[in-house]
Image: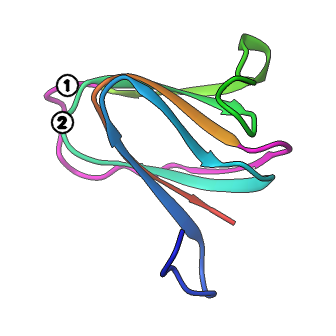
Amino acid sequence: MSGQGNAGFAYTRVNQGAGSTIISAYPRVLHSVATFGTLGGTTLIHDSATVAGTTAANQLFTLNQVAGVGTTPNAPVLDMRFKNGIVAITSGTVDFIALMD
């Protein structure tokens, strides 16, 4: 998260096809997930510090991006505390920014 400064939220952008991304390897509060574009994909968000540690038990929610539906960014407020870290497991093609502190 280099170059993000000290003010405001930290962020990580996930713009990929199927795969996994460690959004944070440390405890965080996930404030919002801003989705972009008309891509079609699904993201499983886990409370885990590592990809190897993801299980159905620590999956907290699913983010769906429906192909061909709207181009306006959508950013619901979540304010969810993750005790271990944040890992995203994606299928299809997704594009979103996770805002956290």
Write the residue at 83% across / 42% down.
84
| Residue at the farthest top position | 56
**Residue type highlighted by circle 2:** Thr
Q: Write down the residue under mark 1.
A: 67
Percent position of residue 39, x then y: 21, 32
- Magenta residue span: 66-85
When the figure is inspected, residue 43 is found, relative to residue 8, above or below; the finding is above
Figure quadrant of the N terminus: bottom right
Q: Write down the residue under mark 2.
A: 38
Task: Name the image quarter holding residue 86.
Answer: top right
When the figure is inspected, residue 95 is found, relative to residue 52, above or below; the finding is below
Q: Residues within 10 Å of mark 2 (few under 14, many from 20)?
A: some
Decide whether the magenta segment is chiefly helix, strand or loop.
Answer: loop
When the figure is inspected, residue 2 is found, relative to residue 88, above or below; the finding is below
Q: Is residue 35 left or right of residue 32?
A: left
Write the residue at 71% across / 48% down.
25
Residue 49 part of the magenta-drawn span: no
Q: Nearer the viewer, residue 69 or 62?
A: 62
Provide the secondary structure element on which disc 1 rests.
loop
Q: Is residue 80 left or right of residue 78?
A: right
Q: Nearer the viewer, residue 12 or 70?
A: 12
Q: Are marks 2 and 1 in contact (CB under 8 Å)?
A: yes
Write the residue at 49% across / 57% down.
12
